[in-house]
Amino acid sequence: MDARATTETASAAEAQSSAALAVDLRSDTVTRPTPEMRRAMAEAAVGDDVYGEDPTVNLLQSRAAEIFGREAALFVPSGSMGNLIAIKVWTRHGNEVICEERGHINQFEMAAMSAIAGCMPRTTFVEDGILTWERIQALIRPKVYYRAQTALISLESSHNMAGGTVYPPDVADEICLRAHAAGLPVHLDGARIFNASVALGRGVIDLTRNFDSVMFCLSKGLGAPVGSMLVSSRDFIDKARVYRKLFGGGMRQAGILAAAGLVALEKSPARLHEDHANARYLAEGLAEISGVRVDLRKVQTNIVIFDVSGTNRTAPEISVLLARHRVLASATSAHEIRMVTHCDVNRAGIDRAIEVFRQILS
């Protein structure tokens, strides 16, 4: 190995070691694969998934469908692609998609529903992010030829930018049943549906049975390095596979990634309660700091969003100061910061984050 390559390798190792020392609360996407995931990846049986011949991908898809009580499932590179595929299956160009204003499909997916699926978001703001049928019904377009037509309703649970709030089962069920009566499908952006399941004490089959399609992430709270899943009917998944290929998501020996996803799917839900407890502990600690306002009612899962306007500093300024002390967080607006707990941050890390926060404000 030449000197340059040695230097680059050393720099990469140093950067990784430095990152590992940080208390990284920016998202639950920053987790590293567990030793069990790495072993599974190294030993995975593989084939060409575009031909449907990767045995590990097929096993992951079969297991996901089973866990959600569905006919079929599809492994996709990202949650954003999964949501876009669902929109594409359920709609056509010129349609509208009803969602909460801060929904991930509206705010963080590069306007793909418009740019690629040809649809417009039809949004409304709800303080806790949880839509009701009453709010949705008011947004449904009348069936006249000169108006854009409502084609899909999309819910998000847990709701990322509302602070990890979850849909009460009776609210979600009413929306699905009334939407179906109106001839409308309902998609669930369930990126963190297992967090919602743990918070509610209800299984994912129970929470999602009335939705027409569900996307969930393996690479967030479940800790896998890459990938999300779509679950639905076999007819839906057959169509979804076409769009996955169209969008550039056809992977070859993807069993290497699916192997980690299988470990995440089987093992990680059982420990999510730890992340929720740490989020509550973090929120309560932040609430004791002068100038910080936390709505503890919204801290239902592993996401804490809090207001720092009372500190006389902006959220971006505080985030920069935190980063200098190796505590990483995300400013979501001029006066709000988001922190997300996950498997790579323990209670000691939470204590450190609270103490650093207190120090920089003092």
Image: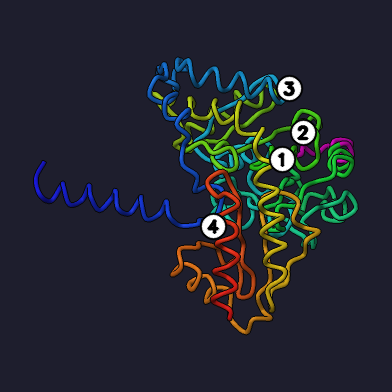
**As shown in the figure, which amino acid type bears the numbered disc 3?**
Gly
Taking the spot 33% from the left edge, 54% from the top edge, the residue there is: 15
Which residue matches tag 4? 26
Which residue matches tag 2? 208
Specify the label residue 188 is tagged with: 1
Quadrant (top left, top right, bottom left, bottom right) of the C terminus:
bottom right
Label 3 or label 1, whichever lies nearer to me, is 3
Distance, label 3 to label 1, CA atoms, is: 15 Å
Q: Is residue 17 above or below residue 177?
A: below
Graded by Cα atoms within 10 Å as few (under 14), some (14 to 19) or many (20 or more), the crowding at tag 2 reads: many
Instruction: Find the magenta span and give its range.
Output: 177-187
**As shown in the figure, which amino acid type bears the numbered disc 1?**
Leu
Taking the spot 42% from the left edge, 51% from the top edge, the residue there is: 20
Q: State which tag comes first along the sequence, 4 or 2.
A: 4
Graded by Cα atoms within 10 Å as few (under 14), some (14 to 19) or many (20 or more), the crowding at tag 1 reads: many
Q: State which tag comes first along the sequence, 3 or 1.
A: 3
Q: State which tag comes first along the sequence, 4 or 1.
A: 4
Distance, label 4 to label 2, CA atoms, is: 28 Å
**As shown in the figure, which amino acid type bears the numbered disc 2?**
Thr
Q: Is residue 220 left or right of residue 180?
A: left
Label 4 or label 2, whichever lies nearer to me, is 4
Distance, label 1 to label 2, CA atoms, is: 8 Å
Q: Is residue 327 above or below residue 199?
A: below
Which residue matches tag 3? 69
Distance, label 4 to label 1, CA atoms, is: 24 Å
Q: State which tag comes first along the sequence, 1 or 2.
A: 1
Tag 1 secondary structure: strand
Residue contact between numbered discs 1 and 2, judged by CB atoms under 8 Å: yes
